[in-house]
Image (cartoon, rainbow, N blue to C red):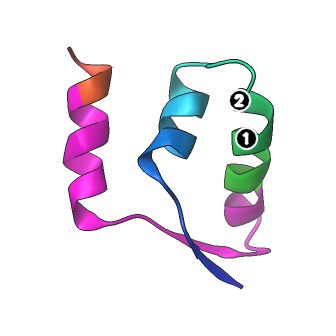
Amino acid sequence: MKIVIDNNVVLDVFQNREPFVGASSKVLRLVETRRIKGFVTANSFTDIYYVLHR
């Protein structure tokens, strides 16, 4: 299965945002263990960087 991961899923994990961090962590764990293929858009990297460093 291939999925596009939204910026908020990544930010939930990095910023430990409740109540979403649990579900978001599961999604990223599935990608990490290669049970699914996860993709982010090219502009997601800059958007995530901006939010984390402001």
Q: Is 40 on the left-hand or right-hand side of 51?
A: right
C-beta proximity under 8 Å, tags 1 and 2: yes
Residue occupying the point 48% across, 54% down: 6
Q: Is residue 47 magenta?
A: yes
Write down the quadrant of residue 41 in the picture: bottom left
**Residue 25, disc:** 1
Q: Is 15 on the left-hand or right-hand side of 27?
A: left
Residue 18: where, in percent of width, then height? 70, 18
Residue occupying the point 25% across, 34% down: 49
Residue occupying the point 79% across, 48% down: 26
Label 2 residue SS: helix
Write down the quadrant of residue 30 in the picture: bottom right
Q: Is residue 36 above or below residue 27?
A: below
Residue 36: where, in percent of width, then height? 72, 75
The one nearer the camera, 10 or 19, is: 19
**Amino acid carrying mark 2 in the image:** Val
Residue 42: where, in percent of width, then height? 24, 65
Please rate how many residues cluster around mark 1, counting C-alpha atoms within 10 Å: few if below 14, some from 14 to 19, many from 20: some
Quadrant where the C terminus is found in the figure: top left
| Span shown in magenta | 30-50
**Residue 2, disc:** none
Residue 2: where, in percent of width, then height? 62, 82
Label 1 residue SS: helix
**Amino acid carrying mark 1 in the image:** Ser
Q: Is residue 39 above or below residue 18?
A: below
Quadrant where the N terminus is found in the figure: bottom right
To which residue does mark 2 refer?
Answer: 21
Residue occupying the point 24% across, 42% down: 47
Q: Is residue 35 magenta?
A: yes
Write down the quadrant of residue 48 in the picture: top left
Q: Is 9 on the left-hand or right-hand side of 44?
A: right
